[in-house]
Amino acid sequence: MTTPSVNCDFSPMKRIIKEDLHQMTERLQQLLRTLDDENDCLLGEFEKIKKNFFHIESSAATFYLNCYLSPYIERYMDLSLCIKTLSERRHGALIAVERNDSIESLLQPGIMIGAPITHSLLESIFYPGSPLHDGAILIRSNQIVSAKNILPLTTTRGNDRITGTRHRAAVGLSELTDAIVLVVSEETGKASFANKGQLYPVITP
């Protein structure tokens, strides 16, 4: 299968990131100037800077995620809406989106679905207590192919700090294929995606 072109205009996102980084740099310079004041405690400021940096990173990751998905899924915004809702409700989820590499041989197959992608169907599958909520959904083109699939876990040194079976499975499949694997933490509600063995936090629209 040939790789579809990714028609993403990176210029607006780069401008936003540059503006955010310039603001952060200015704030860091202000902190440097106040270091000589023994009465100032900077711990609160460090926390703000850390949160700002996380926001910049996750905003960029969300943009890139949509670029990665849009050539392969027409209704990729339904997927984004689903992740947003699951994140807000802290419903754990694991969704593998097949791109060029076939991934079925790497899965322990689950239950066939064979239905078009809709955010309501995705949300119902991952509703706690649903018979299908454990394991991963496989998405190919515009179809939810199957649910309750078991993905290979990462065994790469350095990834032992990744906790949680869903996150280790997301990274594991992305190490072996070009799949994009989305994951929502049941404990924190944080959403992220795995690509090429790395996890990236996302802000959902």
Image: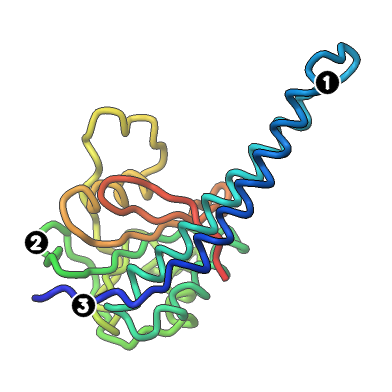
The local secondary structure at tag 2 comes to helix
Relative to 55, is 112 above or below?
below
Q: Quadrant of residue 130?
A: bottom left
Horizontal relation, residue 52 to residue 142: left or right: right
Sequence-first tag of 3 and 1: 3
Which residue is denoted by mark 2 in the rendering? 105
The dot on residue 41 is 1
The type of residue carrying mark 2 is: Ser
Which residue is denoted by mark 3 in the rendering? 4
Circle 2 crowding by C-alpha within 10 Å: few under 14, some 14–19, many from 20? few
Q: Residue furthest right?
A: 39
Circle 1 crowding by C-alpha within 10 Å: few under 14, some 14–19, many from 20? few
Horizontal relation, residue 202 to residue 194: left or right: right
- Give residue 82's position: percent from left, percent from top: 50, 73
- Give residue 181's position: percent from left, percent from top: 32, 59
Mark 3–mark 1 Cα distance, whole angstroms, equals 52 Å
The local secondary structure at tag 3 comes to loop
Nearer the observer, 32 or 42: 32
Sequence-first tag of 1 and 2: 1
Mark 1–mark 2 Cα distance, whole angstroms, equals 55 Å
The type of residue carrying mark 1 is: Cys
The type of residue carrying mark 3 is: Pro
Task: Identify the image quadrant of the C terminus.
Answer: bottom right
Horizontal relation, residue 170 to residue 10: left or right: left
Nearer the observer, 14 or 145: 14
Circle 3 crowding by C-alpha within 10 Å: few under 14, some 14–19, many from 20? few
Residue appearing at x 30%, y 87% in the figure? 115
Answer whether labels 1 and 2 touch (C-beta < 8 Å).
no
